Image: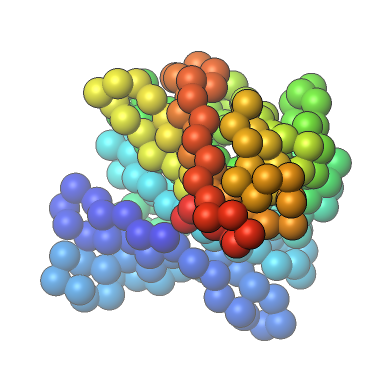
Amino acid sequence: DMEVGPDGSFYIAGSSFYSQNTEMHLVRFSASMVLVWPYTYGSTTASNDYANGVTLDNAGNVYLVGSTFGAWHGVVNSQEDIVVLKVSASSGTLISSRLFSTAAADYAHGVVFDAANNCLYVSGTVGAGYGGQSSYGGLDTLLLKLDLNLNPMFSSQIGSTANDISTSLCLDTVNNVIWVMGYTYGHLNSQINKNRGNLAFDDTMLMAFDMNGNVLDTKLYGLGASYDAGW
């Protein structure tokens, strides 16, 4: 994933295989494509860590989201957990980190900064009930709202009886809508999977949420007996 800062610098998030494990990395380039710095971030145990999404706030901080199989600064994970990092945009140094987990595997792919409300929205996928919510079955889509200290403000877990996997999100500040994209193998929010009950195939999934995490609308798109995923 990539994000452009107010000075034209751009930040590339990804993962690096390093010393027999995978670590999160963040690379900053200037507007003229000169390397400013590269940084890697890893859990305190010898485990794999993946960065999937990146965004910036207005105060000079970068936020990375992804997943980890390890412990971060004394916080031990359950299995694969969602991890969110807050990093200095100027130096690349880690400011803080936080894990979000269920009793199963969880990961995040998307993050956006809401300048009007000074908060973050994170889209992820969870394998069990999160924060007192019930699992719908299989993998569910999770929408998190965090303050800029990475404290949760709300969470919304949505799913079918099959797997519902989020891959990205964006923010419509004019209409106050959070859009979450991904793919589903099930019938979701009264929308019928185009494979007519053959849930061996997936459909592209698009969900609209209001700013409080309530689902406004859902659309599924598919060709039939085919794999159709939104990224």
Residue toward you, 81 or 229: 229
47, 168: nearer the viewer? 168
The number of numbered badges drawn on the structure is 0
Above or below, 15 relative to 189: below
Q: Residue at x 16, y 65 (%)?
A: 31
Q: At 74% across and 57% down in the image, what residue appears?
A: 200
Q: Quadrant of the N terminus?
A: bottom left
Residue 217 in percent (x, y) is at 49, 25
Q: Is residue 141 left or right of residue 9?
A: right
**Residue 185 shows in the view:** yes
In the depicted view, which residue is nearer to us: 115 or 180? 180
Look at the image and name its color scheme. rainbow
Out of 214 and 57, give the one closest to the viewer: 214
Is residue 97 visible from the viewing direction of this image?
no
What x and y, as percent, mark residue 17?
61, 79
**Residue lying at 48% horizontally and 20% vertically, measured from the top left:** 216
Vertically, is 170 above or below 87? above
* Residue 37 point in image, percent of width and height: 35, 70
- Give residue 86's position: percent from left, percent from top: 48, 46
Q: Is residue 150 above or below residue 47?
A: above
Which residue is rendered at x = 20% and y = 66% of the image?
Answer: 30
Task: From the viewer's perspective, tell me whether residue 228 is left or right of residue 120.
Answer: right
